Image (cartoon, rainbow, N blue to C red):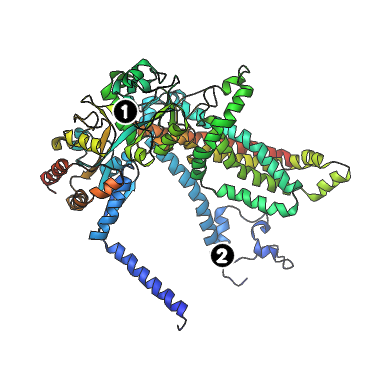
Amino acid sequence: MKNPFVQSTILVVLVLLVAVTGVQAAERLNGAGASFPFPVYSAWAYEYNGITGVQVNYQSIGSGGGQRQITARTVDFGASDAPLSPEDAEKEKLLQFPAVIGGVVPVVNIKGVKAGDLRLDSETLCRVLLGEIKKWNDPAVTALNPGLKLPDESVTVVYRSDGSGTTAIFTTYLSEACSAWKDTVGAGKAVKWPAGIGGKGNEGVANYVKRTRNAIGYVEFAYAKQNKLAHIQLKNAAGTFVEPDMESFKEAATSADFDPARHFHLWLTNAPGAKAWPIAGATFILLAREKSESNLKTTRFFDWAFKSGDATAERLVYVPLPESLKNKVREYWKKAGI
Amino acid sequence: MEEGGYIKPDRDDPGTGEATALPGPVLSRAEPRGLAAFFRRRSPVDVLFATLTGAAGVFIIVIVLGILGVLLSESVLSIEKFGPIGFIFSTEWNPVEELFGAATGLFGTAVTTVLALVFAIPVALGIAIFLSEVSPNFLKGPIGVAIELLAAIPSIVFGMWGLFTLAPIMADHVEPALQSVFGDIPVIGQLFAGTPMGIDLFTASVILSIMIVPFAASISRDAFNLTPALVKESAYGLGATKWEVIRDVILPHARLGVFGGIVLSLGRALGETMAVAFVLGNNHQITSSLFDGAASITVTLANEFTEADSDTYLSALFHLALILFVFSLVVLALAKYILLRAQRKERA
């Protein structure tokens, strides 16, 4: 055993063993669900582990999966982009609260039109996506954009081919904004699109909008910002044209009336604030009511994230909950006996 | 023969030692047959070995039946709601209204699979012929390895490559060219109608064909290499050219092997998911143009499983999987049957 190589190998193995058993001894918290908040949850989990030693293990298996897993009680918490209706939350004995906010941004590729140049209202956007407005220089579009030169070219609609919370938020907005959409298409994570082509994931949609002249699509706010796509300005519920940015999302979150009695069930679409971006949505955490022990661990994690995780969230282009809403959530926990 | 319980084969053949290595075939006709007899006459080690391998074989059947059972039980809701036959022929796919049907998915699966085979088979045969007959020896190694490497690339890589590289090339160059050549011909022109986007049946089939080429090529090559040198040399001796030898001697000789390779590729093409998911569009429609998006069954499952939140929706997806399972079973069984019949004919 004089061989230095053998000795160092044994040392390394011992250190690894200690490390592994150390990890196994740590407190664990298992969550699963929506893929949209996965980057921010895992960044929070990493920091939280460094501070408390608690290991938060989050698997992004999709919102539908998150709802199923927590209903089956196989995880400590579930996560979903679409809020569970208050009735379902009661029926399955679940608790539900928002964790972070994201939004959807329509993006275009029209020659000579830069980010933020094109202005649309919900009615016109809806008619474009329904295929009723076929050309970009349609009077309905030009009326909203005096001074902007729009081509006499056909519109190509690009949508998400996979089921996603992004589509759910976007189609909910369209259904609220115009009745023609509600009657012919409706809202959901996957819908039957009247026109256009489908791209898989944000990257698929973004790629097709970038490559296809005169295309319009929609992607998550974070994705649009990080990839510098040409977003549009939208007329919100208060009648002002707004740009999608951190401020307009925060305003949407602050002005919306989340109701703890209804388990915060709310789509952040057409929020009333004067500068609120109209297509936003909170992503939710689901807890099993009877699991008081793991619920305490979960809420401790999110309480920490509410307190110290805002900077991380903003760095990843998520919108943190406004302070008033955070306090509402904390009260909701207290009321539920956590 | 020291092991206890080991019974000497009747026809002892000490000369070769083969009889003790392979006791099976040397049992005389008078010996009792069947499983029980087999176990009674063997050493414990043999019995253990036979049990283990037997269990491994039976395990496959158990797994397949288990999958079938799960698919059946999960799709009960959808079968009740849409009917086992009605579901297959319904072109509806509307998650909001919760109306589902498999026709669009079956259409996408069938078209991409058939087209991929059409694209892949000539290329695979070309590769195989080159490797076994034409190629100089120093090239055989590198090309053979390259083909096998192609088979090892994860399908998601093909998918992303398809989305970011192949689809733009298709949309900007290949598809407009095809359109200008065939677009004006009646009927055939229909296949190439519409605006070329690169997200369509055509691009998906091309990617799929690239993925199945390695299977078809390497199996065909092995089949070609099995042609006895004697037969080939006889043909050359009679004055046949290389082309004649390939066409009239090697290809007929290796027919079954080539067909087997195609069947294997067919299975791969039917089930391929991620590579196609990025370039097929997942549009639930039956279309006459290859330049339109479509949805295959596997693509629908990959795209919609994670976010399927209603029970009917999820059940419809399981129902789709069940249909693909049965569809593949029928297609592969049919192919196997043809293969077996041809083999029997060959022997006769």
Residue corresponding to mark 2 = B43
The percent position of residue B326, horizontal first and vertical second, equals: 50, 35
Chain name for mark 2: B
In the rendered view, does B205 fall on the left or right side of B258? left
Residue occupying the point 54% across, 48% down: B153
Q: How many dots with numbers?
A: 2
As drawn, which residue projects farthest toward the bottom?
A2
Chain name for mark 1: A
Amino acid under disc 2:
Ser
As drawn, which residue projects farthest toward the front?
A147
Residue corresponding to mark 1 = A171
> Which disc is residue A111 wearing?
none
- Closer to the eye: label 1 or 2: 1
Look at the image and tell me whether residue B343 can be seen.
Answer: no
Badge 2: residue crowd in 10 Å (few <14, some 14–19, many ≥20): some
The percent position of residue B250, horizontal first and vertical second, equals: 76, 43
> Marks 1 and 2, how far apart in space?
70 Å
Q: Which of the 4 image quarters holds residue B337? A: top right
The percent position of residue A51, horizontal first and vertical second, equals: 23, 60
Look at the image and tell me whether residue A86 can be seen.
Answer: yes
Q: Which of the 4 image quarters holds residue B320? A: top left
Q: Nearer the viewer, residue A211 or B295?
A: A211
In the rendered view, does A210 fall on the left or right side of A264? right
**Label 2 secondary element:** loop
Residue occupying the point 48% across, 39% down: B273
Above-or-below relation of B257 to A86: below
**Label 1 secondary element:** helix
Residue occupying the point 69% across, 48% down: B222
Above-or-below relation of B247 to A119: below
The percent position of residue A261, horizontal first and vertical second, equals: 13, 36
Above-or-below relation of B53 to B155: below
